[in-house]
Image (cartoon, helix red, strand yellow):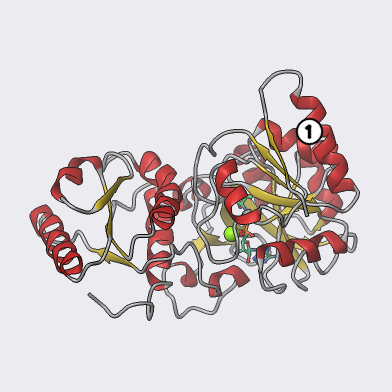
Amino acid sequence: MNTKYILLANDNTDQEAIEEAGSVIRSGGLVAFPTETVYGLGGDALNHHAARKIYAAKGRPSDNPLIVHIADTDSLQDIAQEIPEAARVLAEKYWPGPLTMIFHKKACVPDETTGGRDTVAVRFPDQHTAQRLIKSAGGFVCAPSANLSGKPSPTTGRDVLEDMDGRIDMILDDGASVIGLESTIIDMTSDPPELLRPGAITLQMVQSCVPGVRLHRAVDDQDGAPRAPGMKYRHYAPQAPLYLIGRDDAREDVTGRIRTLCEQAMRTGKKVGVLTCSENAGCYQGASVKILGSEDDEEALAHNLFKSLREFDREGVDIIFSETFDESGIGFALMNRLKKAAAGSAGKDKEP
Ligand code: TXA
Ligand code: MG
């Protein structure tokens, strides 16, 4: 398949491209598109053939359900039932935005879209191109992140091209995703509602409107039963094994320990990558150093994580050492992804 790559110009030629993309989705094809979190791989959420194609293009197990993207809050009632008042409150406050909510599904949503579940995850993204595409595609676009299964989520059109060239019909490139980590997911079918995946909308922000919401135990505990099927798959992992070096000790210790590990690895001829904050960037001579941002700028740190993991893949590093970061705000989601990337590394290489 020839994948058409369209770089949006942010002028009136874009409307034509978006309409073309919408008609590809309406006729059962796949289009990757930008959102404020990460790029999505979109198909018609109400067409079971489209969902099957998405699983095939991603190499994703078909029991891992897709998020249905809508472009106005009213559309929610067309696909979800038993919408609790708490969901209306959260939608009012955080939609459009990086918040996904899970509901009991209506019959019009095919089992393929929901991985066989009787629930449906719904999100209203806060990105102009995404909203225009969803409308043009008929109002309901199912989309996972547009990466090959197991790879870090794509935050630019180029990332998507790397993974999806030849596998999908079209890619709409509208620049880098503003947030860079996937949406917060809350299961509204449980009582109290449970946060299944942390993101830019933090637990505290959710609790400020719906006090009872709690963290599902599997978010931090790798042994918890996976509620979101995606929790059980290997995720966000760069090709090289990644090791997290904790910050519980003094800073000198962290940078010193990473430096020692780098030196050991380099002595055995390995190409080493380090994930760090700008304050510590000068500490790691000889390694490929990626600066996520200033240590107290959680948004920048989060924004640059997947981008940096993909850069390590392009450079072909053999091993990666990462500092840990403060878990306040979106920092909690950042550390959640880093821990998963590190867990995905187990067994790739012996512990350093
Ligand atoms: O920010 C995002 O959410 C991005 C953009 C493209 O919107 N999408 C995204 O989709 O991250 P994906 O498929 O990579 O991750 C969605 C997660 C998966 O772990 C999946 O298992 C879970 O949501 N999920 C989807 N529907 C669900 C359902 N009905 N019940 C439980 N978990 C569900
Ligand atoms: Mg994903």
Relative to 2, does residue 246 appear above or below in the rendering? below
- Residue type at mark 1 is Ile
Query: Residue 286: image x %, image y %?
Result: 18, 52
- The structure residue drawn at horizontal position 42% and vertical position 65%, both measured from the top left corner, is 341
* 233 sits to left or right of 319: right
- The structure residue drawn at horizontal position 19% and vertical position 64%, both measured from the top left corner, is 266
Query: Residue 75: image x %, image y %?
Result: 82, 44
* 6 sits to left or right of 321: right
Q: Which quadrant of the figure contains the C terminus?
A: bottom left
Query: Residue 101: image x %, image y %?
Result: 66, 55
**Circle count:** 1
Query: Which image quadrant is residue 153 in?
Result: bottom right
- The structure residue drawn at horizontal position 41% and vertical position 50%, both measured from the top left corner, is 311
Identify residue for label 1.
18
Foreground of the two, 137 or 310? 310
Foreground of the two, 317 or 344? 317
Q: Which quadrant of the figure contains the N terminus?
A: bottom right
* 221 sits to left or right of 350: right
Ligand 1 shows up in the quarter that is bottom right
Query: Residue 322: image x %, image y %?
Result: 28, 58
Q: Is residue 138 visible?
A: no
Relative to 179, does residue 105 appear above or below in the rendering? below
Query: Farthest residue toward the top?
Result: 12
Element assignment for label 1: helix
* Beta carbon of the mark 1 residue lies under 8 A of ligand 1: no
Relative to 70, does residue 168 appear above or below in the rendering? below
- The structure residue drawn at horizontal position 89% and vertical position 47%, both measured from the top left corner, is 26
Q: Is residue 161 visible?
A: yes
